[in-house]
Amino acid sequence: MTKTIDIEQDRRGIATLTINRRGKLNSFDEAQVNLFNDKLATLHSQDGLRALVLQGAGKLFCAGADLIYLRDKGAEPWEKNLADAKKYAAMMTQLRKLKVPVIAKVHGGAYGGGVGMVAASDIVISESTSSFAITEGRYGFTASIMMPYLLPRIGTRQARRWCLTSEQMSAKRAFSIGLVDLVVDVGCLDVALEKLLDGLLHNGPTSVMETKLAMNYLSYSIHNHTAVKKSVIAFAKGRAMKSAAEGAASFIESRKPRWALPAISLKEI
Amino acid sequence: MAEQEVLLSIDARGIGTITINRPQVYNAYNADLLEALGQAIEAFVDDKHVRIIQIRSNGKLFQAGADINWLKANSSNSLEVNRSISELTTNTFKTLNECSKPLVVLVQGGCFGGGVGIVAAADIVISEEGVEFAITEVRWGLVAGPILTQLVSAIGLQNTRRFSLTAELFDANRALEIGLIHHVCPVGGLDKAVLPVFELLLRAGPNALNATKQLIFDATGTSLDDKTAHWIINQNASQRQSSEASEGLASFVERRKPSWYPRGKENDQNY
């Protein structure tokens, strides 16, 4: 069986986690969520770790949750649905609480939950051609798990627009609203990453960890466990809705969902 | 008599000026300077004649943060002494940040570590072009706890995450983009650039300004509460006493790379 998450650690203590589910646009299903959580827990307790680089294999960074997985979990009894939603949320919490800085390295694109991973990272580098979209609404789901991380990153004013419209945004736009910290030319991700890592490696390993801890403690939205709890409930509720089944079906059948009206021409008005 | 760490003056319009005056060490702060700074703010807040407070500094560089030699001398001291240093630092930054009168800060040359905290505590910041900023604490094995809450308020969580973890340099234009400062002026142009700011603040009702400032803190919940302050002080003191901090501070004094930097790497671009 091929590994769907690769982890490598170099002698400097830089770990690289590669999401590798290429046929499925690096999306997350139940097995992948569990695997990701296990890997992060292992990394967290690992000695000598200085930073984690998060990347996707193949064409893009990550397309978020696998819609089939979302739909199937939504159809399960509420308690089961909720228990699974907690695991999904744990991915973001673990990224945010990982003792060392997390650097997301984005190429191609990040969609849905992929944007959540980006938002939960400490530093985000993107190639100039990457695109971003908070696509949950487009498929009848609710964008929720990412909120405790997305809102402090881009602010409520920007979040209202991008979460509600599911529009696609360029890397440049993502930079200007604060979702991305650095935009580099195609092929230059590794150069930019090395420069950042070199800076990080100059800094005291414990003081970097303590600084991250202090920011997590002092920034109210993360400190606020209720926000995470509420986001889990909204996520579980969202995928149990009828619209989720229709949205997932529309995706599988490569058609528009029923609620998507055909474009109105001026003549009709 | 020793040179005064801060110089104070009040002009006829009601502008109280605090000039940080330790140019021989790039205006780095020790306990005396922090105490004098906190007392100056409190005195100006109490003084009816003062309507606006400005902080500037003498010499080439605005402020280099904490005096590393002072920190180094104290890091091997008792936990009690270290707690009192962290307490003084945290309280001084709280006094600056929550000062009830408008606070204007003028920046020249460079601004590092705690100096970025002074900037983040201000209502209005003007910087000369070309000024370099960096949140340098982690570079020396320290934690920027006493300035973190204001930094998050000033530049947002995402920028704080990046710049306080990497300790990288950023210039005045980048500082403007991320909202740390409000205006960039030519070198030597601070006095001229600040004039319209004073003019506008003097037109505003003094009580209305104070009430507006108070409301901003209340509405955003950004005043530093005792519990959080206590957490910051403890973390700050124990990290300063750690072996990592003593290595980091030694690497600064001896102008060498700290032991935690991977060996055999020739990339010296950050030095």
Image (cartoon, coloured by chain):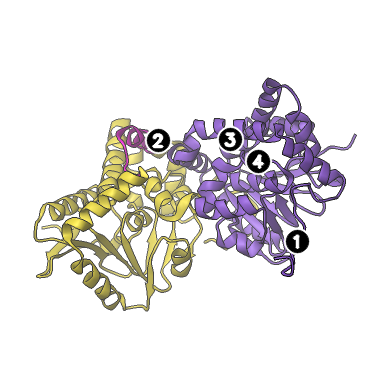
Q: Are the residues flagged by discs 1 and 4 from a single subunit?
A: yes
How much space separates mark 2 and mark 4, taking CA atoms? 39 Å
Secondary structure mostly taken by the magenta-highlighted segment of the chain: helix
SS of the residue under disc 1: loop
Q: Position of residue B227 (x, y in %)?
A: 33, 32
Residue at coordinates 34% horizontally, 45% vertically from top-left?
B219
Residue at coordinates 31% horizontally, 78% vertically from top-left?
B189
Pointer 2: what residue? Answer: B235
Whether A158 is among the magenta residues is no
Q: Are marks 4 and 3 in contact (CB under 8 Å)?
A: no
How much space separates mark 1 and mark 4, taking CA atoms? 24 Å
Q: Position of residue B81 (x, y in %)?
A: 28, 35
Say what amino acid the circle numbered 4 marks: Thr
Q: Which chain is yellow?
A: B
Q: Nearer the viewer, mark 2 or mark 4?
A: 4
Q: How many marks?
A: 4
Say what amino acid the circle numbered 1 marks: Ala
Say what amino acid the circle numbered 3 marks: Ser
Q: Are marks 2 and 3 in contact (CB under 8 Å)?
A: no
Left or right: B263 as drawn, with respect to A242: left
Q: Nearer the viewer, mark 2 or mark 1?
A: 1
Of residues B169 and B245, which is closer to you in this image?
A: B169
Pointer 4: what residue? Answer: A142
How much space separates mark 3 and mark 1, taking CA atoms? 33 Å
Left or right: A15 as drawn, with respect to B174: right
Say what amino acid the circle numbered 2 marks: Gln
